[in-house]
Image (cartoon, grey):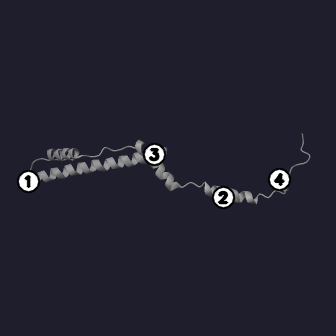
Amino acid sequence: MAVIDPIDPFASDINVSSTNDQSSELMDRLKPDYDKNFAKYQQRLAPYTYQAPSMSFYDLASELGAGLLATPNTGGASAFTGLGVGFTTFGRGVGTSCDLSSTLFSNLGVGA
């Protein structure tokens, strides 16, 4: 079946210029506020994020004791060397815990 009288969409008396203004006005009204939404989703997802266990005084004492025991007793300075080893190990543990929690938090953000 052939089309005898084709319809010309541009030969119309309808004025569509006001539609463009209304759509841009609607888009401006519905534009999302990303800062507000980020804070909202961060608050909602906080219970599901990884919470690294906080280091306690006993963890510090354990690391200092391990450092003292690992250092050979060669005189008066060996105790300070052992304490230095213990503090270094404790600091690395805290840093690793912070890095792990930030990595898991960013992974949660990517998954959301």
Q: Give the mark nearest the N terminus, 4 or 2.
A: 4
- Mark 3 and mark 1 in contact? Answer it, CB < 8 Å: no
Tell me the residue that label 3 is attached to. Answer: 44
Q: Amino acid at mark 1?
A: Gly
53 w.r.t. 21: above or below: above
Q: Amino acid at mark 2?
A: Glu
How far is mark 4 from mark 1, CA to CA? 96 Å
Give the residue drawn at x 21%, y 44%. 58
Between 53 and 75, the one nearer to me in the picture: 53
Q: Nearer the viewer, mark 1 or mark 2?
A: 2
Give the residue drawn at x 52%, y 54%. 34
Q: Give the mark nearest the N terminus, 4 or 1.
A: 4
Q: Nearer the viewer, mark 3 or mark 1?
A: 3
Check disc 3: other Cα within 10 Å, few if <14, some if 14-19, many if 20+: few
- Mark 1 and mark 2 in contact? Answer it, CB < 8 Å: no
Residue 53 image offset from top left, x and y in percent: 31, 43
Between 102 and 25, the one nearer to me in the picture: 25
Tell me the residue that label 4 is attached to. Answer: 9
Give the residue drawn at x 26%, y 51%. 91
Q: Give the mark nearest the N terminus, 4 or 3.
A: 4
Q: Amino acid at mark 4?
A: Pro
Name the element at disc 3.
helix
Task: Residue at the far left: name it.
Answer: 75
Tell me the residue that label 2 is attached to. Answer: 25
Tell me the residue that label 1 is attached to. Answer: 76
Q: In which quarter of the view is residue 18 placed? A: bottom right
Quadrant containing the N terminus in the rendered view? top right
Q: Nearer the viewer, mark 4 or mark 2?
A: 2
How far is mark 4 from mark 2, CA to CA? 26 Å
Residue 82 image offset from top left, x and y in percent: 16, 50
Residue 54 image offset from top left, x and y in percent: 29, 46
Between 70 and 11, the one nearer to me in the picture: 11
